[in-house]
Amino acid sequence: MYNCDLSCNTKKYLDEYSCILNQMINGINNARLTNSISHNFIVQMIPHHEAAIQMSKNLLKYTTNLALQNIANNIISEQTRSIERMRIILCCCAQERNSRQCLCKYKAKTDEILKTMFSQMSCAESTNNIDCNFIREMIPHHMGAVRLCENALQYDICCELTPILKNIISSQKRGIMQMKQLYNQLCCK
């Protein structure tokens, strides 16, 4: 399964990452969907955010890079707050109904975004540089979140959900930019 040249720490990191990725995929794919885009977005984004939190905690066991520690800690705090906000509004937002046509269009685009994200995260290159591995795994995760939010914002959604989506977009785009800059500084290529 692994390149023979990978260290024990890298293998432990990657084993945990694989578990986190599988839990996220199962959580998203097994979410109970309804005729509410608002509800569907929330119940699929919560396991997505939970994965980012777990990925960040996994990284923090191994990294000594202060910039990456800050990025991981920001992911943990921002996405924990986002999950709390989404859980608070879930029941209210689930009342917002959408037409069958909108639901089908939303689901088709969501499925496409998720398929791309799952594939990119599953196929991320793994080396003995755990910091670089994390960045290669987290960038497609963040890009997926941005695309999922942008997709949901095209439809009638619960008014309490809109600012959460806009916050996710801005924070994840900022995180992508920070990680890309750090990736180049770390000479990960």
Image (cartoon, rainbow, N blue to C red):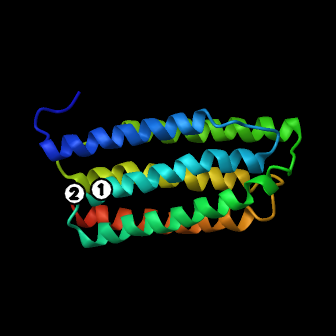
Q: Percent position (x, y) of residue 48?
A: 53, 48
Is 177 located above or below residue 48 in the figure?
A: below
Q: Percent position (x, y) of residue 152?
A: 72, 52
Q: Secondary structure at mark 1?
A: helix
Asked if marks 2 and 1 touch (Cβ < 8 Å), the reply is: yes
Q: Amino acid at mark 1?
A: Leu
- Residue at the image position 47 percent from the left and 68 percent from the top: 77
Q: Amino acid at mark 2?
A: Tyr
Nearest the viewer among 179 and 29 is 29
Report how far apart the C-alphas of labels 2 and 1 lie in the structure: 6 Å
- Residue at the image position 17 percent from the left and 33 percent from the top: 3
Say which mark, if any, is on residue 144.
Answer: none
Q: Percent position (x, y) of residue 166?
A: 66, 66
- 118 left or right, relative to 64: right
Crowding around mark 1 (Cα neighbors within 10 Å: few <14, some 14 to 19, many 20+) is many
Which picture quadrant has residue 90?
A: bottom right
Q: Secondary structure at mark 2?
A: loop
In the picture, which quadrant includes the N terminus? top left
- Residue at the image position 68 percent from the left and 40 percent from the top: 109
The residue tagged 1 is 59
Which picture quadrant has residue 86?
A: bottom right
The residue tagged 2 is 62
